Amino acid sequence: MTQPLQIQYIPMMEYGDAWDKQKKLVKDIDEGQQQEHLLLLQHPPTYTIGSQRHPEHLLLGPEQLREQGISVFEIDRGGDITYHGPGQLVGYPLLWLDGSKGLDLHGYLRQLEQVIINYLSSFGVVGSRKPEFTGVWVGDRKITAIGVKFNKCRHRKGFVTSHGFAFNIKSGIEAEGFRGIIPCGIQQYGVTSLEDVTGQSMTVEQTARDIIPYFNEVFGYNGSIVINE
C-alpha cells in the first residue's frame, strides 16, 4: 500500500449521513476516483442491526426509543445489534483489497482487532480476542465491537471494505445505550471503556489522533494525510 491513507475526523455525524458517505466512497474507490479512506467519528445515540439480526436482542419498544432519542438502522454489515453514541470512537476503513496482501475477510477482522490491541498495550492494558466472538476484550468485557462488509468491485478486481469498529472511550457508555440491547447477541459478557480500564480521563478526539499510527502500522501504510471538509 504505497499511497498515503486519507483520514477524516468528524466530531459528530448522523448515522444515515455516515452510511451514505461510506457508500459514495466505496463507489469512488472502486472507480479509482478516490484514495483509500479512514473515517473516524462519533454518532448520536443509534442502534445498528447487522445481517445476523435477532429482533429480540433489541429490548426497547418504539415509544422508549423515541423518548430516549435513539435511532435504529438495519444495515448491511455482518453481526447483530450494537450501540453507537457520544463517547465512542467509530472507525470506518474504506480500503481496496485486491488480493495482493492475501487478506481475506477473517484476516481483515483480525487486523482490525490488532489495531485496538496494540493501542491498548500502550497503556499497559491487555486487550484480547475470544475465539467465538469478533471484537476486542479486556477480561470478560468487550471494549470494541467490529462488523464489516466486503463490497465486490465492479471496475477492478477485489473488494472495498466498509463499516468497521466501535471503540468505547468514555466511562458510563454502558448505562447510556448498551442496556437497551443484548450487544452483539452476547448475554454472558458486558462492555467496558478506555477510561474504565486505564483509570484516565480520555477524549474521543485525542484517541482518534493517537490511534492513527497503530492503524498505519498494522495495515502497512507508510503515512497518512488528515483531511477536512
Image (tube, grey):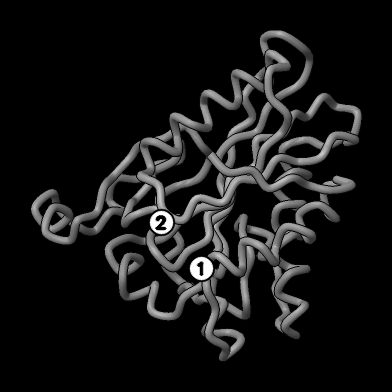
Based on the displayed image, in which of its 4 quarters is residue 127 positioned?
Answer: bottom right
**At 28% across and 45% down in the image, what residue appears?**
72
In terms of secondary structure, where does tag 1 sit?
strand
Q: Is residue 86 left or right of residue 202?
A: left
In terms of secondary structure, where does tag 2 sit?
strand
Question: Residue flagged by tag 2: what amino acid is it?
Answer: His
Q: Which residue is mark 2?
A: 84
The percent position of residue 64, horizontal first and vertical second, equals 13, 58
Front in this rendered view, residue 151 or 44: 44
Question: Residue flagged by tag 1: what amino acid is it?
Answer: Asn
**At 65% across and 35% down in the image, what residue appears?**
94
Q: Which residue is mark 1?
A: 168
The percent position of residue 8, horizontal first and vertical second, equals 60, 46
The percent position of residue 37, horizontal first and vertical second, equals 67, 38
Q: Is residue 207 left or right of residue 20?
A: right
Q: Is residue 79 left or right of residue 172?
A: right
Q: Is residue 54 above or below residue 217?
A: above
**At 34% across and 51% down in the image, what residue appears?**
47
